[in-house]
Image: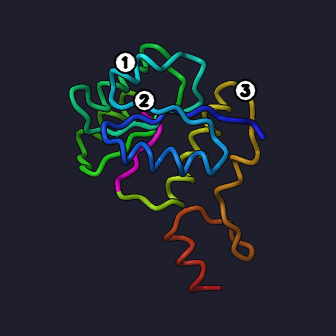
């Protein structure tokens, strides 16, 4: 299995620790940064397969961090997360090239699914396909292949 290197950024230590532990259980190499400035000092283009960052941080926001990361590496997937979901922040981050947005609190399944999709996307940009990532987050129910929790619920009712 390919070992993916993921940078996790948040200004709250418990959040970083929790996400780090979830990712390490999945076999990922995780580097922590406590805030945007530390993330910028840690980040090196081509050395990370994924960045996961909180939006609401001080003094540098996640959106500002995303903008600075994009100046260094236009292709690294970045997942934004926030407990304070606003349309403006989500739209701005997606315009700047964020891969996806996770609203806290999120389920472990949604988190793993988003991470797998982001890593598969990043690998595809490099011309490499990781089939385990591409199919790993789908669940097969009978003859249906579903991804989202809601579709799994619908499928379980009709099966």
Q: Is residue 12 above or below residue 48?
A: below
First in sequence: mark 2 vs mark 1: 1
Which residue was labeled with disc 3? Answer: 127
CA gap between label 3 and label 1 equals: 25 Å
Quadrant occupied by the N terminus: top right
Q: Which mark is residue 140?
A: none
Q: Is residue 123 left or right of residue 19?
A: right
First in sequence: mark 3 vs mark 2: 2
Toward which corner of the image does residue 97 lie, by quadrant?
A: top left
Q: Nearer the viewer, mark 3 or mark 1?
A: 1
Which residue was labeled with disc 2? Answer: 97
Secondary structure under the numbered disc 3 in the rendered image = loop
Q: Is residue 128 left or right of residue 50?
A: right
Q: Is residue 107 above or below residue 8?
A: below
Secondary structure under the numbered disc 1 in the rendered image = helix
CA gap between label 2 and label 1 equals: 11 Å
Q: Give residue 49's position: percent from left, percent from top.
A: 59, 30
Toward which corner of the image does residue 127 lie, by quadrant?
A: top right
Which residue was labeled with disc 1? Answer: 68
Neighbourhood count class around disc 2 (C-alpha, 10 Å): few under 14, some 14–19, many 20 upward: some
Residue at 59%, 61% in the rendered image: 147
Neighbourhood count class around disc 1 (C-alpha, 10 Å): few under 14, some 14–19, many 20 upward: some
Which contiguous range is marked in magenta? 97-104
Residue at 45%, 50% in the rendered image: 18
């Amino acid at each position: 299995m390919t070992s993916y290197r993921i940078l996790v950024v948040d200004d709250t230590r418990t959040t970083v620790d929790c996400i780090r532990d979830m990712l390490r259980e999945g076999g990922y190499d995780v580097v922590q940064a406590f805030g945007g400035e530390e993330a910028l000092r840690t980040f090196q283009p081509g050395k990370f397969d994924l960045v996961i960052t909180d939006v609401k941080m001080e003094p540098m926001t996640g959106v500002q961090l995303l903008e600075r990361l994009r100046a260094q590496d236009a292709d690294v997937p970045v997942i934004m997360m926030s407990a304070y979901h606003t349309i403006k922040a989500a739209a701005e981050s997606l315009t700047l090239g964020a891969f996806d947005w996770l609203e806290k609190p999120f389920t472990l399944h949604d988190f793993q699914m988003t991470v797998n999709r982001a890593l598969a996307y990043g690998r595809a940009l490099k011309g490499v396909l990781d089939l385990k990532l591409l199919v790993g987050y789908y669940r097969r129910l009978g003859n249906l292949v579903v991804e989202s929790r809601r579709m799994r619920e619908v499928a379980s009712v009709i099966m």
